[in-house]
């Protein structure tokens, strides 16, 4: 198993999350961790082929290491989208075989593709041929009435045969019939032992675990077995708790000692965004949980929630005062 800069970064990654991990969110997250791997929101292959490519693919140079997640099930479209995206210099291109969203099912991609592993193998084979960087897969342990103990090892075997060397496994089934996308993130039971066994059965693959991992203690526990851990909602809702000290996993000193320093460090980026005609809430909606569990957190969140859609930097500074005055 090759250890490259991007596989090293995949020791800890922040999951691709639709409507959440946009470019503003990634700038914010990157301030707290220089080392963790960040992912874009999923972008569909047809959108890249036919849509506004700079809007979909542009990112801040500071995002690196950063991966692009693609959605689709047509091998030719995914090959074309991968070839186009190559010009943007992402560190990895990932295929979504895990998202249970109804938006995803209707387009025949995401977790529903667990039912057609041969098609997934063809897709990733075409993507690998078109990509100058590593192609990876994010999957579930199965869907609907599939038996994960049978389906998951077979899926990994087929991915390996197609040339995939790195897979992130969400340790839940996706119940595509009867559960909403939100319910699919909580209700299907987690099966960490099964995912851990996959690392034993596929020692040559780089395998990351995802799903329900809520703190850094859990991250360290999983890393005793797995090559990497991917965190989703906890990193978004409690970013300082997860990312503030994340670089210690690599033996590095974290960039900041306290979350108010992160908030201050975001100010130039926010001012630049406002000067270009952007809105404050486009950035601060990703920052509401920065002071989670700390004095003043409620005032910070309330000030931004109520004022950021209409106000400017003065709203941001007022929100920060809610925290710093209590800490003084």
Image: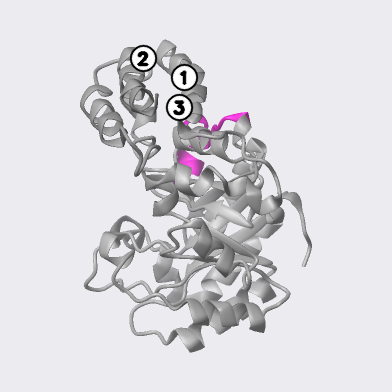
Which residue lies under the disc numbered 1? 267
Which is in the foreground here, disc 3 or disc 2? 3
Residue at 53% across, 77% down: 195
Task: Please say whether residue 4 is visible from this viewpoint.
Answer: yes
Which is in the foreground here, disc 1 or disc 3? 3
Contact between marks 1 and 2 (CB within 8 A): the answer is yes
- Examine the rendered structure and indicate whether residue 167 appears above or below residue 250: below
Q: CA distance from mark 3 to mark 2?
A: 12 Å
Residue at 68% across, 58% down: 128
Residue 263 numbered tag: 3
301 relative to 14 in the view: left or right:
left
Residue at 44% across, 54% down: 232
Contact between marks 1 and 3 (CB within 8 A): the answer is yes
The earlier-in-sequence mark between 1 and 2 is 1
Q: Quadrant of the C terminus?
A: top left
178 relative to 82 in the view: left or right:
left
Segment colored magenta: 47-61
- Examine the rendered structure and indicate whether residue 139 appears above or below residue 142: above
Number of residue marks: 3
Reply yes or no: does residue 194 show up in magenta: no
10 Å crowding of disc 2: few (<14), some (14-19), many (20+): some
Q: Quadrant of the N terminus?
A: bottom right
* Element type at mark 2: helix
- Front residue of 244/140: it is 244
Residue 304 numbered tag: none
* Element type at mark 3: helix
Q: CA distance from mark 1 to mark 3?
A: 7 Å
Colour style of the rendered protein structure? one colour
- Front residue of 323/6: it is 323
Residue 313 numbered tag: 2
Can you give x and y, in whole percent of width and height, for residue 250 in the image? 69, 51
């Amino acid at each position: 198993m090759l250890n490259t800069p991007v596989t090293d970064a995949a020791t800890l990654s922040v999951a691709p999350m639709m409507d959440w991990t946009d470019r503003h969110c990634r700038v914010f997250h990157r301030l707290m961790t220089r080392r963790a791997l960040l992912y874009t929101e999923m972008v569909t292959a047809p959108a890249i082929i036919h849509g506004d490519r700079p809007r979909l693919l542009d990112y801040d140079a500071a995002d690196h290491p950063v991966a692009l997640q693609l959605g689709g099930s047509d091998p030719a479209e995914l090959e074309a989208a991968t070839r186009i995206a190559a010009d943007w210099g992402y560190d990895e291109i990932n295929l979504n075989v895990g998202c249970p969203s109804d938006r995803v099912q209707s387009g025949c991609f995401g977790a529903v593709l667990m039912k057609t592993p041969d098609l997934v193998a063809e897709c990733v084979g075409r993507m690998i041929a078109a990509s100058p960087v590593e192609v990876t897969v994010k999957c579930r342990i199965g869907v609907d009435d599939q038996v994960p103990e049978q389906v998951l090892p077979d899926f990994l075997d087929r991915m390996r045969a197609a040339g995939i060397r790195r897979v992130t496994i969400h340790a839940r089934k996706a119940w595509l019939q009867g559960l909403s996308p939100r319910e699919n993130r909580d209700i299907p039971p987690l099966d960490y032992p099964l995912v851990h066994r996959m690392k034993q059965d596929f020692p040559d693959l780089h395998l990351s675990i995802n799903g329900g991992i809520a703190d850094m203690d859990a991250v360290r526990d999983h890393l005793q077995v797995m090559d990497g851990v991917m965190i989703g909602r906890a990193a978004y809702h409690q970013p300082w708790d997860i990312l503030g000290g994340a670089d210690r996993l690599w033996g590095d000193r974290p960039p900041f000692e306290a979350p108010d320093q992160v908030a201050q460090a975001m100010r130039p980026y926010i001012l630049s965004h406002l000067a270009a005609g952007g809105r404050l809430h486009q950035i601060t909606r990703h920052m509401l949980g920065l002071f989670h569990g700390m004095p003043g957190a409620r005032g910070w969140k309330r000030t931004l929630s109520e004022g950021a859609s209409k106000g400017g930097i003065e709203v941001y500074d007022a929100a920060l005062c809610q925290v710093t005055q209590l800490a003084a």
